[in-house]
Image (cartoon, grey):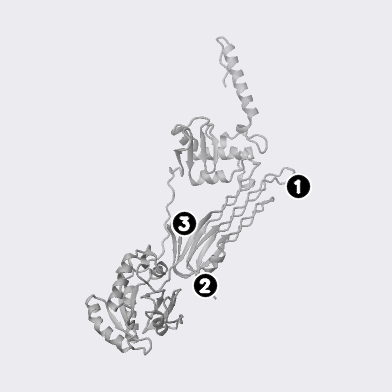
């Protein structure tokens, strides 16, 4: 037995970027031929794609986790790693993507619509790409960036032009079956319709869709019965049709009270998309007039409904009486709605380049540490994620990049001092100011090392400076030795 699922929670994880390679070209008579490490491949994205052939979220109910493939690491001889393949997840037309907090991330309407649910991580650069005029043979490479991982809620909201609204067993499924080729389950007990059904109707040159959804009961807007599931599937409908059972003798209901109850539930429900339901064009269908008592009751209440400004149609799904007039009335209402829509404008790509003086990061005080600071920004955080902190030269390269970006100047401007804890991304370190970095000021040490992180070289430099200062002081009236 097939199941219909219209709300699921999924976990998506994009692929990680491949690590860069630190390699030196070696061959006969050229043991040190220069860096030749390749770049890592980019991680694959997780993409949601609207597929007209998919009508339910059932697949995600059984497989709620999805992960794209990761990029391959780079190799020597300038061989770049392969990028990970994107993972495409097929979803029905009308799927709304929400965050766990209820914020709408995407509204997927239209065949082929795509949404990147999780972006793959960038691949790390190899040491061949990191070589420069002053750093001719880097002894390190950048790590691949982890892919994005997030939880999402998928909700299916049917895409139809006309939505049938009514109490259980009011004849909505029967009406869809005679207006279109749809064959929903029909029975004489409440809540026969448990899942929405769509039917395609043709009236003249107009083709439109009709949605048959679960029946409504009083209190549906507060979640009673199948209320929220019912109301979710009529949010996108342009025209609402109140289907009223005029043959429900002895049920304690009458057509006018049924219409009033339906109107109250529509007014109490405020959808996140598409505007209030109470403002949509509405028609009233007085059904089952093939029963003599039902015909008399329909003729009795019709003037009252017309006086309220509601178009009324008396129909019978058994004898098909009144169905032709109803079909063309719905067609006219759909055409009017489509004509009122704004003309589709061509898609424009707006490019907003970052200003030259825009730093791309900000420095704030750390609320958890009185003397600490937090650096937030896309580039600094990405650089930290791609740094191998087991390699001193890679850490020195990170310090150069942050200094060139202006992070050190920004820290000094907000009052940071040597030894203050500074957090960038998931890494916290003690800040030690250095001279402004640049290609002309880079001082290289042994392969895989950085002189700023070498305690021995720091001590030697301090000793040499102290010795020069002592010689100057000992020179009485002589020319001071320059530093």
Compare marks 3 and 1 and give the one earlier in the sequence.
1
Residue 282 position within the rendered picture, expressed as x and y whole percent measured from the top left: 30, 74
Q: Which residue is at a point 57% across and 64% down the rendered structure image? A: 63
Residue matched to label 2: 3
Residue matched to label 1: 27
Nearest to the observer: residue 126 or residue 152? 152
Q: Residues within 10 Å of mark 3 (few under 14, many from 20)?
A: few
Q: Is residue 172 left or right of residue 472?
A: left
**Given this view, does label 3 or label 2 mark the residue nearer the observer?**
2
Residue 35 position within the rendered picture, expressed as x and y whole percent measured from the top left: 67, 45
Q: Residue furthest top?
A: 476
Whether residue 149 is visible, yes or no, is: yes
Secondary structure of the residue carrying tag 2 is loop
Compare marks 3 and 2 and give the one earlier in the sequence.
2
**Given this view, does label 2 or label 1 mark the residue nearer the observer?**
2
Residue 149 position within the rendered picture, expressed as x and y whole percent measured from the top left: 54, 54
Figure quadrant of the N terminus: bottom right
Whether residue 207 is visible, yes or no, is: no
Q: Which residue is at a point 67% across and 38% down the rendered structure image? A: 447
Secondary structure of the residue carrying tag 3 is loop
* Residue 469's disc number: none
Q: Residues within 10 Å of mark 1 (few under 14, many from 20)?
A: few
Residue matched to label 3: 100
Secondary structure of the residue carrying tag 1 is loop
Compare marks 2 and 1 and give the one earlier in the sequence.
2
Q: Are marks 3 and 2 in contact (CB under 8 Å)?
A: no
Cα separation, mark 2 vs mark 1, equals 64 Å
Residue 45 position within the rendered picture, expressed as x and y whole percent measured from the top left: 55, 59
The answer to which image quadrant residue 230 occupies is: bottom left
Number of numbered discs on residues = 3
């Amino acid at each position: 037995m097939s199941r219909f699922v219209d709300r699921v929670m999924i976990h998506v994880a994009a692929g990680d970027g491949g690590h860069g390679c630190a390699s030196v070209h070696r061959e006969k008579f050229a043991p040190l031929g220069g860096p030749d490490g390749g770049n890592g491949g980019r991680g694959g994205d997780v993409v949601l794609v609207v597929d007209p052939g998919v009508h339910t979220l059932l697949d995600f109910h059984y497989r709620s986790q999805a992960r794209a493939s990761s990029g391959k690491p780079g190799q020597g001889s300038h061989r770049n790693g392969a990028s990970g393949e994107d993972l495409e997840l097929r979803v029905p037309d009308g799927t709304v993507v929400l965050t766990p907090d209820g914020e709408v991330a995407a509204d997927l309407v239209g065949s082929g619509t795509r949404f990147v649910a999780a972006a793959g991580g960038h691949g790390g650069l190899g040491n061949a790409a990191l070589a420069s005029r002053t750093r001719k043979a880097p002894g390190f490479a950048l790590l691949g960036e982890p892919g994005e991982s997030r939880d999402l809620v998928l909700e299916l909201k049917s895409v139809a032009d006309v939505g049938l609204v009514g109490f259980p067993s009011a004849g909505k499924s029967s009406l869809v079956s005679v207006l279109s080729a749809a064959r929903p389950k029909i029975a004489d007990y409440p809540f026969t319709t448990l899942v929405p059904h769509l039917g395609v109707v043709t009236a003249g040159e107009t083709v439109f869709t009709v949605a048959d959804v679960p029946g409504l009961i009083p209190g549906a807007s507060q979640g009673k019965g199948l209320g929220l599931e019912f109301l979710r599937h009529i949010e996108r409908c342009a025209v609402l049709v109140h289907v009223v059972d005029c043959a429900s003798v002895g049920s304690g209901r009458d057509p006018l009270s049924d219409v009033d109850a339906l109107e109250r539930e529509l007014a109490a429900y405020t959808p996140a998309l598409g505007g209030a339901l109470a403002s949509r064009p509405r028609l009233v269908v007085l059904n089952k007039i093939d029963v003599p008592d039902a015909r008399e009751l329909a003729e009795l209440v019709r003037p009252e409904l017309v006086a309220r400004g509601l178009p009324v149609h008396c129909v019978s799904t058994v004898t098909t009486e009144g169905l032709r007039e109803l079909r063309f009335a719905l067609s006219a209402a759909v055409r009017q709605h489509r004509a009122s829509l704004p003309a589709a404008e061509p898609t424009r790509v707006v490019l907003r380049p970052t200003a030259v003086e825009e730093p791309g990061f900000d420095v704030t005080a750390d609320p958890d540490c009185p003397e600490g600071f937090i650096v937030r920004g896309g580039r600094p955080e990405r650089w930290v994620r791609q740094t191998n902190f087991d390699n001193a030269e890679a850490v020195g390269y990170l310090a150069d990049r942050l200094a060139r970006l202006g992070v050190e100047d920004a820290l000094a401007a907000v009052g940071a001092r040597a030894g203050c804890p500074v957090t960038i991304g998931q890494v916290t370190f003690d800040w030690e100011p250095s001279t402004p970095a640049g290609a002309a000021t880079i001082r290289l040490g042994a392969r895989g090392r950085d002189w700023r992180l070498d305690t021995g070289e720091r001590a030697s430099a301090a000793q040499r400076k102290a010795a020069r200062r002592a010689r100057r002081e000992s020179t009485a009236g002589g020319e001071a030795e320059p530093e």
